[in-house]
Image (tube, rainbow, N blue to C red):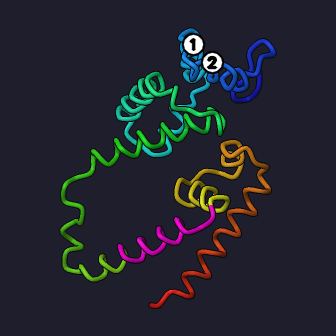
Amino acid sequence: MTRDGATRDGVDLRAELERVAVAAAAGDRAALDRTLELIDRLGLVRTAVRRVVVNAQMVEDVCQDVVVAVAERVGSWDGRSRFSTWLYTVARNRAIDAVRRQRPTDEIPARLAADQRRVSSMIAERRDVQAMLEDLPDRYRRPVIMRDVEQLDYDEIAALLDLKPATVRTRVSRGRVMIGRRLEESPQ
């Protein structure tokens, strides 16, 4: 057994997940059951959700929501990416949605109300950076977002994008340089 419990009796459970997910996406109910079992055994959903959600009870609720979403939408996975990457995206999006639903209606705390111009400037700067991120070529944008926004480590990003960690480091670095240049060029 490996450190993360990814093998059982010499069988790589992550590789098995990728194989059975293909059949599940094609409509095989038994494969879907096995897919859901492997997702649970490997703890993939919980890992993705915990990156976004802090509250333990909310983590449980979101994990259940993700499992239901996977069962209902597995047919939408087109196989262009690894199943685990698709699963991670579904889990992350559900977690973000859950956090958004929990936000208080008063977005700006009262103590910041006196300094609205500062807050407005911060929001504008965030929008500028977000726009710059969106303008990056996909090969740089995805690794930069996963590293700098989602706080994933390089090995996790490499696994999700099916790249070597050194390639991920290079793409993150180049993406950051591109954003830095655009920030320097933008009018203050």
Distance from the alpha carbon under mark 1 to that under mark 2: 5 Å
Q: Is residue 128 magenta?
A: yes
Q: Where does the image place residue 174, in percent across and percent down from the top left?
A: 70, 69
Q: Secondary structure at mark 1?
A: loop
Bin the neighbour count of mark 2 within 10 Å (Cα to Cα): few under 14, some 14-19, many 20 and up.
some
Q: Where does the image place residue 12, in percent across and percent down from the top left?
A: 76, 22
**Residue drawn at (54%, 16%) of the image:** 27
- Side of 18 where 60 appears, left or right: left
Q: Are marks 1 and 2 in contact (CB under 8 Å)?
A: yes
Residue that mark 1 sits on: 28
Residue that mark 2 sits on: 23
Q: Secondary structure at mark 2?
A: helix
Which residue is more in the foreground, 138 or 162? 138
What quarter of the picture does the C terminus occupy? bottom left
Circle 1: residue type:
Asp
**Residue drawn at (60%, 19%) of the image:** 38
Q: Is residue 126 magenta?
A: yes
- Side of 137 where 186 appears, left or right: left
**Residue drawn at (50%, 44%) of the image:** 51
- Side of 29 where 172 appears, left or right: right
Q: Where does the image place residue 142, in percent across and percent down from the top left?
A: 60, 56
Bin the neighbour count of mark 1 within 10 Å (Cα to Cα): few under 14, some 14-19, many 20 and up.
some
Above or below residue 106? Residue 52 is above
Circle 2: residue type:
Ala
Q: Magenta segment, which residues? A: 123-137
Residue 17: name its quadrant. top right
